[in-house]
């Protein structure tokens, strides 16, 4: 544990271990939970990393929905 001098002159201890995100500062740390925004952000990240898989998944979901929701 590292010691940190507070503005009032008191010594405080801080842990040097990174948080669950590996020590990165994320939007989640500074704002309340936003599940819809997080889901969209995750989908965009996944689509950038694996565009073929994402495109085939969208095609499959569209095919199933089109097949099940046909008007006749």
Image: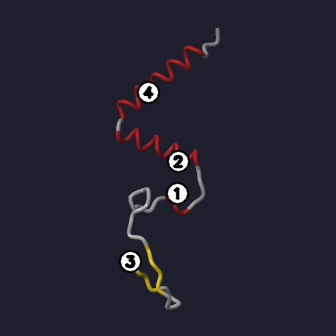
Of 68 and 25, which appears nearest the observer?
Answer: 25
Question: Looking at the image, which residue sits at the far top?
Answer: 72
Q: Which label number is shown at residue 28? A: 1
Q: Residue at x 50, y 18 (%)?
A: 63
Name the image quarter holding residue 23: bottom left
Q: Position of residue 3 (x, y in %)?
A: 41, 81
Q: Circle 4: is it few (<14), some (14-19), or many (20+) Cα within 10 Å?
A: few
Residue under pointer 3: 2
Q: Mark 4 against mark 3, which lies toward the viewer? A: 3
Q: Is 65 left or right of 14, judged from the image as shown?
A: right
Q: Residue at x 46, y 22 (%)?
A: 60
Marks 4 & 1, CB-CB < 8 Å contact: no
Q: Circle 2: is it few (<14), some (14-19), or many (20+) Cα within 10 Å?
A: few
Q: Secondary structure at mark 4?
A: helix
Name the image quarter holding residue 44: top left
Of label 2 and label 4, which has the lower sequence position? 2
Of label 3 and label 2, which has the lower sequence position? 3
């Amino acid at each position: 544990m590292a010691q940190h001098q507070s503005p009032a002159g008191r010594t405080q201890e801080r842990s040097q271990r990174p948080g669950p995100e590996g020590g990165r500062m994320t939007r989640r740390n500074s704002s309340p939970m936003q599940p819809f925004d997080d889901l969209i952000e995750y989908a965009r990240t996944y689509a950038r990393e694996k565009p073929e898989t994402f495109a085939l998944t969208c095609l499959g979901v569209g095919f199933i929905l089109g097949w099940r929701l046909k008007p006749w």
